[in-house]
Image (cartoon, rainbow, N blue to C red):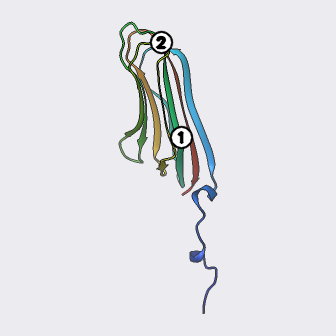
Amino acid sequence: MVRVGTPSAVARPDWYDRNPITRVGGWSAEDLAPHAQTLRFTYTVPAGKKAMVEILHGLIMRKTAAGVLDSAEIWWQIYPGGGGGVTVIAQILHSNTVGDKDIQALGPSLTLLAADQLRCYTIDVSTGGTNDWLVGYKITEFDA
């Protein structure tokens, strides 16, 4: 007997056809003074899902000059479920000129699995002065 249309013969839909959900997030601040390493947000892929990271972006702009200059940084890290983190993109501003900035973006290049985390940190170890900050992401979650 020949079976037609068995479940094993049905093609699996592409990722964008598997109940996609758009996730966006970010953080911004103006005239922010120097600060210790700070976690700005975390995104964790839910159980039974995968996630396509479509964009990560970050901007640091010198608003007022620092008394003693040191670096201001944004970094994005991926923490695979149960594992340590790895930095995938970083912005580093090491300039005391008002208006100078570092802006970077990472386009569609990462697929995250269930329990993987995306984290965004900032730090400014200068003494005095302020910066404007803007970070954000867009992710599409879909059935695994």
Point out residue 57 in the picture as x, y percentages from the top left corner. Answer: 51, 34
* Circle on res. 88: none
What residue sits 60% from the left and 93% below the top? 1
Q: In this view, does 8 lie to the left or right of 89?
A: right
Mark 2 falls on what kind of element?
loop
- Residue receiving disc 2: 98
Q: Position of residue 38 (x, y in %)?
A: 44, 25
Residue 72: percent from the left, percent from the top? 41, 21
Residue name at image x 39 percent, y 6 percent? 67
The vertical placement of 137 against 35, above or below, is below
Disc 2 marks a residue whose amino acid type is: Val
* Quadrant location of the C terminus in the rendered image: bottom right
x, y (%) of residue 14?
59, 61
Q: Mark 1 points at which residue?
A: 55
Residue at position x 46%, y 46% from top?
A: 116
Q: Can residue 5 be seen in this view?
A: yes
